Image (tube, helix red, strand yellow):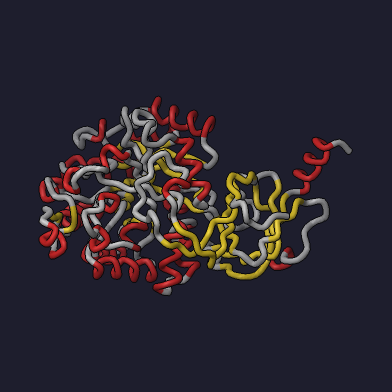
Amino acid sequence: MRAPEKRKAAAAKGTAFINARLIDPASNRDEPGGLLVIGGEIADIGGHLRRNAPEGAEVIDCQGHVLAPGLIDMQVFTGEPGAEHRETLKTASLAAAAGGVTTIVVMPDTSPVIDQVALVDFIQRRARDNAVVRVHTMAALTKGLEGREITEIGLLKRAGAIAFSNGKGSVVDTKVMYNALLYAKDFGALIVHHTEDPYLSNGACMNAGHVAARLGLPGVPKAAETIVLERDIRLVEITGGRYHAATISCRESLDIVRAAKAAKLPVTCGASINHLTLNENDIGPYRTFFKLRPPLRAEDDRAALVRGLASGDIDVIVSSHDPQDADVKRRPFAEAADGAIGLETLLSAALRLHHTEGVNLTVLLRAMTINPAKLLGLPSGRLEKGAPADLVMFDLGQPWVVDRDALRSRSKNSPFDEGKMQGRILLTMVAGDIVYQYPEAPRG
């Protein structure tokens, strides 16, 4: 049999992952076993595949490492279209693959803004041609992200928009937000909102408090977040629209979300990995890679968010990947651009919460797999027969140090630069194809 014929025969038999620690948050599975991939889908899974692969299948011995659903990151800012010098869909997807992220949801903050059907189609075509992971679009909630006129939610959703957001800005006009929630409800659309009062945050650059006072920097009070969040919850109560607070950053916001959930409102929330693992003290001597939006809060707030994640009150963890070039980061702290990259370090940074703060691994992965999948209506995020073969294998204990020059993102503004990590991505698979493999990863 010639080589091409052998490859075709092996593909028909599939790829078998054996000797794995299978973790599937969707079913609460955490057990030794194996998994068989055929035709881009999971064909079989369980303990019976731990040692024995089907005859003829390509075998990958996981050597006891974790095999889990690929991560879904529902807040990724890119530069395409309009600012490709910061990031393209291709470079973002390569960074995602190296970080175990198999699905990214790109935000509408581009130039032009993704507020028309043609632009949703453009992103889908560009991703199909250039990206190595799955790419979905979160379309603009208001035209031009200006907060004045609602976009054609129904048409955009039909074109493939997976959710709707006003990007990095809040919808200030209460009537517009009310109408948006009401209109989105007719289409079963999810509204993802950045909760920040622009009047309270105007001119400020970090969390208001003792650290800001010591550094002589203007601070953003937590009320800038909670005022908008409380207003939005009231509007959800009136309209019944599906609502997701994109990235809460303080204990008071978590309390508001808890109360909304207790009232059975269709409300969920997310937190960025930055706000779960870092605090305002990390800014140190005006380090602009830590200038984020919302700003890093006090340690008490960070610890409260971690407890909220462990209890299930925080539904989703995002990277909030926001590439910025050196020109806008090498400035005085108050003048530097907000944002940090995070796709490639998302899982490894999240594992800090497991290693040092005792967050259950299944709970941690749930917030990056099945929870966003359910919110967005995606078939991935789970290990079960018939599900897409979007997988990540990682060594839970392997230490490594973040090197900005080795990061695949086009921009290098990582708050974890030179940070010590414990947990290395070994392999990432999307639709049955290996899109990333660490050179020292186990091989068949």
Residue 289 versus residue 212 in the image, above or below: above
Residue 416 percent coordinates (x, y): 37, 56
Residue extending farthest to the top is: 118
Q: Tell me what residue is drawn at x 18 percent, y 46 percent.
A: 332
Residue 163 versus residue 195 in the image, above or below: above
Q: Tell me what residue is drawn at x 79 percent, y 56 percent.
A: 54
Residue 255 versus residue 334 in the image, above or below: below
Residue 110 versus residue 69 in the image, above or below: above
Quadrant placement of the C terminus: bottom right
Residue closer to the observer: 237 or 344:
344
Residue closer to the observer: 159 or 183:
159
State left or right for residue 321 relative to residue 72: left
Is residue 256 visible in this depiction of the protein? no
Residue closer to the observer: 407 or 297:
407
- Quadrant of residue 184 within the rendered picture: top left
Q: Tell me what residue is drawn at x 21 percent, y 43 percent.
A: 331
- Quadrant of residue 383 within the rendered picture: bottom right
Q: Tell me what residue is drawn at x 61 percent, y 64 percent.
A: 65
Residue 137 percent coordinates (x, y): 41, 38
Is residue 32 visible in this depiction of the protein? yes
Residue 97 percent coordinates (x, y): 52, 47
State left or right for residue 420 relative to residue 48: left
